Amino acid sequence: MAKIILDPIGRSKDSVLDASTFTRRTEEMTARESRFLAARETVRDGWGDDGRARVHKKSKLTAWERLERLKDPDAPLLPVGTLVNFGLEFGDRKQTSPGAGVITAFTRVHDRWVMVIANDNTVASGSWWPKTPEKIERAQEMARRLKVPVIYLVDCSGLFLPEQGKSFPGATGGGHIFKKNSLLSAEGVPQIAGVFGDCIAGGGYMPIISDKVYMTEEAYMVIAGAALIKGAKAQKMTSHSIGGPDVHVGVSGCADYRLPDDEHCLAAMRLEVASLPSSAAGYYRSGAEAADPRFAPTELTGLVPADHRVAYDMREVLARLVDASLFWEVMADVGEEVITGVARISGLYVGIIANHSGLIDDPDHAGRKKPSGILYKQGIAKLAAFSRACNDDGLPMIWLQDISGFDIGPEAERQGLLGYGSSLIYTNSTNTTPMATVLLRKASGAGYYAMAGLPYDPVLQLSTPVTRLAVMEGRTLAIGAFNTKLDDDFRVVADTPEEAKKIEDGMKAVESRIEADMDPMASARQMDTDEVVLVSELRERLVAFTEMTYQAYGVRRIKNPRIWSLHDLEVLRCRA
């Protein structure tokens, strides 16, 4: 019978770095993090005190207050898409839409992980802005892939009409939310909706396909409000009289229950979640207990260099993410530029794939070293084989990226890296087991794709404040763009000083523009990543992801460890 032997990894931070280096790196990382902490507070503030006062005047709770009452008291609240639209202004009045006017977050209700989608009713009465539908759909897709219940806290006055052209049409326009509602329903993912206020047009449609719909006395759902109905003013009609709980609970059947206010509605919704099956995570732990890493995750703030040019030990990162800092490394002596193996997170098995940082031995040239952070032939084949085995065994996968791309040059082409890369891309494209991707620092070129970047549909992609997501570094791209003006050593070739300066200025402009594009704030703003988290928060996020992948019963095949394909890989490698 095959056994899983998890070996200790990691050292104390004092053994890894001297105190002054650790302190300096901590200060550098903390300085980079401060901007994102401030941005989170700005988003959470919505439209400020005035927005909260308008909500409270109607005897309603704000979206954040509803979330606090919905979740378990000790449960974390883990938003995704926090920085969507951050810093952008819309309409003639140059209005902002913090978080695109909607909160999407994972949390626990009666010890079950759920995805909550809550209109921020302090921001234009919960209107849908550009990117709002896409953000909601991304949250729905996460829940669909993880098979965790979706809870809608609906308080939405419909599209923000001055910008409707950016949120109504197109493949991810507002109507696609209702298709996601339908897919969730068709696949048996529970959906529970609470309607707390204005729900007009699309806002009215969003809760309808849910399994259970609750309405407060303040709520109404209408295809069109009274303002658009001819004669409504003369007949003293209101949107509430047209589509309030009297109509939709008492007559139409579009809602199931009516509650006097927000507090009672949220309490009833909590009881609804309690009636769902409990998590299967305990079953899949097979008697193991969740355990903290032996080394504090907060130490990552000083161990991961903010400077992307500085190498570090990825195994020290793993030692601060996995249970008890224990890890079974698979195929350790081949493709050393990548680390593959199995660990437990919250007592549950996960497959882990990570880029090595620093120099490694060159298997094709004895005695020579070559840089890691690049994918070579053996590493690509190792990743593909490991990824297939994890998928076959039903293990969720966590990808930790710090990659500059693929190997290049005549030898790489002769070795067929295009073909090996295609095999890896095919594998990750067809995997059905849940995958999460963390962009620790560099996420460049085809390496970003090959390591399960967002275009390859991981359930979740996280960035950090030092992530650099782009085709290539700004300096490299500038060299490529001005290649005909440079010699073999990349020095400017020009007939006059004026021409040389013009070329140098052009290269600097390209480099600056690419550096701005690589800013993780920009990626988060346009939904090129799901969330920017501090490196010290990664453990908490990965615990949540792992527990959610094991929560639902019978939605994927999870082999018991005795029959893992991973054992076969190790046996064949050892005999080779």
Image: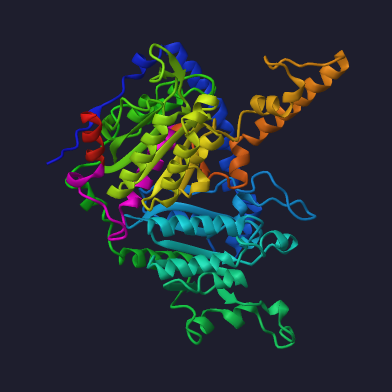
**Residue 1, quarter of picture:** top left
Chief secondary structure of the magenta portion? helix
Q: Is residue 200 above or below residue 381?
A: below
Magenta segment: 536-565
Whether residue 97 is in magenta: the answer is no
Q: Position of residue 111 (x, y in %)?
A: 31, 54
Q: Position of residue 493 (x, y in %)?
A: 78, 16
Q: Is residue 552 above or below residue 412?
A: below
The residue closer to the viewer here, 105 or 504, is 504
**Image quadrant where one finds the C terminus:** top left
The colour scheme of the drawn protein is rainbow
* Residue 62 shows up from this direction: no
The residue closer to the viewer here, 286 or 249, is 286
Q: Is residue 557 above or below residue 530?
A: below
- Residue drawn at (47%, 39%) of the image: 419
Farthest residue, direction front: 414
**Residue 369, quarter of picture:** top left
Compared across the picture, whether 354 is left or right of 172 comes to left
- Residue drawn at (66%, 30%) of the image: 515
Whether residue 540 is in magenta: the answer is yes
The residue closer to the viewer here, 279 or 355, is 355
Q: Position of residue 474 (x, y in %)?
A: 66, 28
Compared across the picture, whether 61 is left or right of 110 comes to right
